[in-house]
Amino acid sequence: MGMTITEKILAARAGQEKVVPGDLINADVDIALGNDITAPIAIRQFRESGAEKVFDKDRVILVPDHFVPNKDIASAMQAKELRDFAKEQELTWFFDAGEMGVEHSLLPEKGLVLPGDLVIGADSHTCTYGGLGAFSTGIGSTDLAAAMIRGKVWLKVPESIRFVYKGTLSPWVEGKDLILYTIGDIGVDGALYMAMEFTGPVIEQMGMAGRLTMANMAIEAGGKNGIIAPDAETESYVSPRAVRPYKNYRSDEDAVYAKVIEYDVSNIEAQVAFPHLPENTRGISEVGEIIIDQAVIGSCTNGRIEDMRSAAAVLKGKKAAKGVRLIIIPSTPCVYNTALKEGLFEIFTQAGAIISPPTCGPCLGGYMGILAKGERAVATTNRNFVGRMGHPESEVYLSNPAVAAASAVLGKIGSPDEL
């Protein structure tokens, strides 16, 4: 009996020839990641333990990205804790100020997370890196502290669900729509503590941005991780960036899955997730008349250059509707500079958009676009829980960048085809 890609990576990192779902393992960590919200707690736990040095200064990465540039005194103090710790521990990879980007966009871009890695991060969307063929998952701050000290993590090997995507994508349908449709189909607990393995001809033809987006939202279906086997597309993205050697894994043909679910994407239109769960999805033709106050294009889900180009293609020569705040947040300095060089910022500003420096910002209700009572936003972010982007009586609708851009122009949630 063969193993899935997830099982192979976990077996390798546990120093075992084979693992099966349900096994409890103590595995070596390739990358331990923290941000300005979660890492301060881990740093305090690190100090309380009596530890003096992290297990490997090249493998502990800190990225203050949630409230940076600092929005208030409390966030400034949190960021300072990271800066002081990074300096004290002489961490190789600490990203601040003009180098800072949204962590889950920044690390792949920098070649710091690689195929075959075991990555843990004190952030639920650490599962993003499965798009590269890594096993990556979110953990708590206490577990991060332990990993920073020992370089190991205790895990239960998850069962795997294999998702197979066939057919041809319609115009304006992207990776974001496929993962929203999938979550809408199986529910927010449909893959609880399971590996979501995305496969099929559609995935093979998908660019890295779409793959990272799909893996990013595995947690929204309860998944332990999302993962896509590396291929030529992965290699073309990773090889020029990689800061160290890596190994590609693929599932065996006789690997055992808890379920195999197939989709014909030809029948899937652009999706919108209604409040207050990512599973409340509807096709764009079924949305109805949803007037919006704000449109946000960015985040670790959809803030990459491909997302900026998608939004610009819709916004070119158009203006955001009166009363709609259009906020665009490139996810890294590289994305920012590329968008600037390609003339996308001119398109955005002529459309009446606000362009933010890289930050998580409004995604978690941090800043740069907080909603007031009764306001509605369409956003390319990954969560739309109650109060996620501001007031508990506000509403967030999730979509891809093209739909968010079109909605800003229309003043209501709608498709680019309506423009």
Image: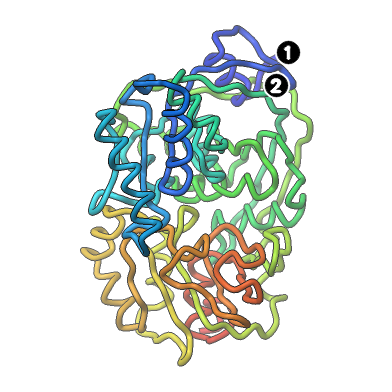
- Whole-angstrom CA distance, mark 1 to mark 2, is 6 Å
Q: Quadrant of residue 197?
A: top right
| Residue 136 drawn above or below residue 356 | above
SS of the residue at dot 2?
A: loop
Q: Along the line of sight, which residue is nearer the eye, 104 or 178?
A: 104
Q: Residue furthest bottom?
A: 322
Residue at the (54%, 47%) spot, across then down: 216
| Residue 94 drawn above or below residue 56 | below
Residue at the (66%, 55%) spot, across then down: 265
Residue at the (62%, 54%) spot, across then down: 178
Give percent across and percent down for residue 323: 48, 90
Q: Quadrant of residue 359?
A: bottom left
Give percent across and percent down for residue 365: 51, 65
Give percent across and percent down for residue 389: 55, 68
Residues packed near mark 2 inside 10 Å, few (<14), some (14 to 19) or many (20 plus): few
Q: Along the line of sight, which residue is nearer the eye, 27 or 43?
A: 43
SS of the residue at dot 1?
A: loop
Residues packed near mark 1 inside 10 Å, few (<14), some (14 to 19) or many (20 plus): few
Q: Quadrant of residue 76?
A: bottom left
Tell me the tag on residue 255: 2
- Looking at marks 1 and 2 on the same chain, the residue that comes earlier in the sequence is marked by 1
Q: Is residue 305 visible?
A: no
Q: Is residue 253 visible?
A: yes
Q: Amino acid at mark 1?
A: Met
**In the image, is 55 to the left or to the right of 380?**
left
Which residue bears the numbered disc 1? 1
Q: Amino acid at mark 2?
A: Ala
**In the image, is 23 to the left or to the right of 135?**
right
